[in-house]
Each structure stands twice: as C-alpha cells, then as structure tokens.
Amino acid sequence: MAATETAVSRSMPKFFFSTYLNSLSQTPKKLKKRALATWTPDQELNKVRLRSGADMKRKLTWYDLVALGVGGMLGVGVFVTTGPVARKTAGPAVFISYIVAGLSALLSSLCYTEFSVEVPVAGGAFSYLRITFGEFVGYFAGANILMDYVLSNAAVSRSFTEYLSYAFGEGNPDSWRVKVDGLMEGYNMLDFPAVALIILLTICLCHSTKESSLLNLVMTIFHVVFFGFIIIAGFYKGSSDNLVKPAGGLAPFGVRGVLDGAAIVYFSYIGYDSVSTMAEEITNPSKSLPVGIVGSVLIVSALYCLMALSLCLLLPYNLIPEQGSFSAAFKMMGWKWASNVVGVGASLGIVASLLVAMLGQARYLCVVGRARLVPSWLAKVHPSTGTPLNATIFLGICQASVALFTELKIVIEIISIGTLVVFYLVANALIYRRYAIINGNPPFQVLLFLFLVSSSSLGFSLSWKLDLQWWNLPLFGFLTLSFTALFHRLVPCARRPENWSVPLMPWPAAMSIFLNVFLMGTLNAKAYKRFGIWSGMICLFYVVYGVHSTYRVEEMDNGGMENGDNNHVNNNNTQPIKVEIQVL
C-alpha cells in the first residue's frame, strides 16, 4: 500500500508537467479564441461577479465618493511631485503644469464616468476595456493600473516618513531611514516607518469598507482645512517676486518645461479612478458616480494649482528642496512651527490618500481574479466583512516590499506612463462603444478614426519632443481637429446611454486621446524602457497562465463544449453583444 502511494506521488508531478506542456502547445488556438473575447455588461454585472462568492456591501453615498476621490488624490501628488518639478522641470510655472494635467484628468474622468454608470462593477478600466476591446486589452490595462497603484503607493508611503520627520522637528528627511551601504543608490535607504504604515492600513481595509470610508471622510475634511492653511500662509508670507525675479522669470524652462512637468505631475491625479472601483458598494451608482468622479477631480485640480503657487511664492524655484518641500520651505522662511504643522498635516493627508488607493487597488485585482486571469483565490470576498480580503493582503505585501527599498525618482515616470496608457485606452473604448456598439456603425469606420486621431496626436507629440520644424505642430494639430470634425459630421450617434453620458461626443474623448498621447511623448527614454520590460512580463504571464486559465473556465462553464457558437462569450464584432448593450 505504501509503495503504491509512493509511486502515485512520484507520478503526479510528471502528469501535471505533461498536461501543462500539452496545454502550452495549444496556446495559438486559445489566444485566437480568448484574446478578443468580450463580455456583455449584463454578464459582467451578474455571472462574473458571482465568482467572488459573497457580494460587496452597498453602503457608500455620493459624499463618501467625493471624499474618497479628494482624499485619494490630495496627498499623492502635491506633497511628492511639486518640489522636484518646480526645481528641475517647470520652475514657478509648475501651477500651469497642474492645470494642463488637470484638464487631461478631467477629460479622462468623463470617459470613466460614463462607463462606471453603465457597468457599475469594481473592475474599473479592466472591466470597461474587456467589454469593449476584449480580454487581452482589458488584462493589459488592469495589469498596468495595478502596477501604477503599487508603485505610487510605495512612493507616497516613503514621503510619509519624510514629512513625519519634519513633524517631529528633524531637519533631515532621511533621518528615520536606515542606510545600507552594500545596496545600489536609490535602493539603499530602508524605510521601515513606510512599511509599518502599509501594514496598519492593510489591516484596517481588511475589516470594513464603510468604516474605512468614514475614517477617510474625517481625515479628508481635516486635510482640506490644512490645505487652506498652507495656501493662506503661503500667499501671506510669500512674495510675487519669487515668481518672476529669478533667472528666466515665470517659466525659466520655457513652454517645454511646463508641458514636461505636466506629464510628471499627472502622477498626482492617480486616485479618482479609485472611485469607479467602488461601484459595487454604492447605494445609487447612476447618480453618485458622476458627482463623485468629476467633482473630486475639479476640487483637487483647484487645490493643486493654489498649493503649487503658494510654494513658489514662498521661495525662488531654485531654492525649493526636493524632499519634504512644503515643510522645508516654511522652515527656511523662519516659521519652524509652521514647518512642524505642515509635517503633521502632510503625513495625515498621505495616510488618507494611501487608504483610498489601497481600497481601489484591491478591487481591481479582485475583478481580474474573477476573470481568472490571475489565481482565483484573489477574487474571494470575505462573507462577514464584504471586502476582498486576499487581494488586499497580497497587494499590501507587494507594496510594502517596494516601499522598503525604492525611492520616488526610480518609479515616478513609469507610474505616469502606465496611467496615461490606461486613460488613453479608456478614451478609445468610449468612442468605439458609443459609435460602433450602441449605435451600430461599421466598426471599421470607428477604428479608422481612432487610428487617424492617435497617429496625428503621435505626430504632434514627436514633433514637440524632437523639436522638429515649427510647421509640424500646427499641421498635426489641424489634422487632429479635422479628423474629429469630419467624424462628428459623417458618423451618426443618435443613441446614448440612458443614465449618464459624456456630452459633445466625440470631442471630449478625442481631446483626451490627444492629451494622453502628447503627455506620454514628453517622458524620457528610461521610462519607456522600464515600461517595455513590464509590458513584456505581463504579456508573457498572459500567454503562459492567463489565456489557459480563462479558456479552461469558459470550457467548464459551457459543459466542455468546444463549439464557439455555444460560447456565451461574444466576439467583438458579433451582433448579439450589440443587441444586449443597446437593451441596457
């Protein structure tokens, strides 16, 4: 008996290995069937959601969403990026960089809002793209947004340590970190307070969404009041001479510096999309989501611009410290007590932003797990707390690991490029969904328009980046406007979603495409190399795991039938998906 069991145990690894090799040999067939496979909104809302077991609990209202959006964005960017961008990239005109980035974020938020109202699930961009362009595009966007969350949260948690040191009167932002000489520069300052903060927030988020939201609401109210203090103190204590007197005036790095700065500070707007991931926990999604998403972007954009302006009023741009900028600026002005206050307020603001971001990232991963593109245990919702427990813990561990070693300068630009790529895809998906799926126009017409607009936007961006002859910029700008105007005139769009829709289509989505492509073009080559490596890794994971997992699940759901006509997953160009979406 023992010998038999031993023989069986030895044969099991060989069996699984041979089975997996056989599965890999069928990869082309599975890619052909799965990569462009789409779900209808009804399937995303019902069948896929059931894979999590328990439902998430609907307890959030519109003011919870506004607080989550504001809290999620405020601490992320202005305390982390304003100082470095003002000093090295845009100068005192950094507030204009925030305006440009805010406009792009507002246009993207409109696209998000229409999708989130029509498909109120926790998957955000992943779900929106999956029902429009298919499984692979949705997976690619979901993997990138998760990377952005993990890296940005890790970077922001390290900024928490810097501001906390100022709150306790320390003059050195690295005073609470441990230097390890044997590690590479940029990875050699171990940040244990950041790791402790992530662990505490992970425990809090595992307990309850509503209680976490109430905590965020209180902290966000305090945070906005605190922002008001910084703005008033900056305008009172600062001088307009600091905006124009330093060498180069308001924009010492020119228009190019302002726009390059906009691409970097776009990192500051990561957070509003977290609101869309709360869709399964909102009592009235169709009314609350538009207010929560658009309202939070508008509020935060105004506060960012005023905060950046107040910092540049306090000090000439070339004297602004890159670490703990606001606290250090007040200290250099002789207001040590204000420096301590700013340290406390900034630390609490960063905690609020981390709370929201970590709330959203777990829901993204939960829905990707429902689709079986990652192991299914990440999709489980705890029956008593109504939270995605496994996803929250897993991402908390990943985040803490990055925060322990990695400095902001290492990750900031790859975060921006990942976010811009996802927002670019969502804008494309909105146009395709509205014109090809809902209104039934030929898909080729819509795809041709998207290709032309993207190409002219890329031409404009490259002309700017490579500093080509002056006539290239107006040429490509004119082409973008002309393509959009012709499409608007020639391709009908009579039907619109019933609950909420982006006005003046296709202009807002087309301008979002243009701005996202342009801002991506301003980033440096190193960011693209890192993004390329990450993209290669996630594509490899899809080929060796994701496509096989989803293929197997769909085969099981259909009783093992191989016939594509019996598959409930529709092809992107088939009529049934159009009919189902029109009915919705």
Image: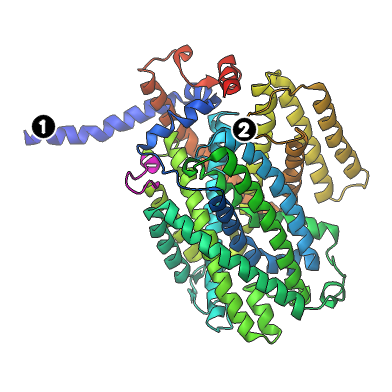
Residue in front for this viewpoint, 172 or 466: 172
Q: Which residue position holds label 1?
A: 4
Residue in front for this viewpoint, 68 or 142: 68
Please state the horizontal and vertical placement of residue 321, each as a whole percent of the image: 68, 75
Quadrant that contains the N terminus: top left
Classify residue 23 by image quadrant: top left
Q: Secondary structure at mark 2?
A: loop
Where are the magenta residues, as a range? 377-388
From the image, state whether disc 2 or disc 1 is nearer to you: 2
As drawn, 71 above or below 382: below
As drawn, 338 above or below 547: below
As drawn, 346 above or below 381: below
State left or right for residue 184 relative to residue 78: left
Residue depicted at 64% across the width and 22% down the height: 437
**Mark 1: amino acid:** Thr
Report if residue 383 lies within the magenta region. Answer: yes
Q: Which residue position holds label 2?
A: 499
Please state the horizontal and vertical placement of residue 157, each as a whole percent of the image: 52, 65
Residue depicted at 81% across the width and 40% down the height: 459
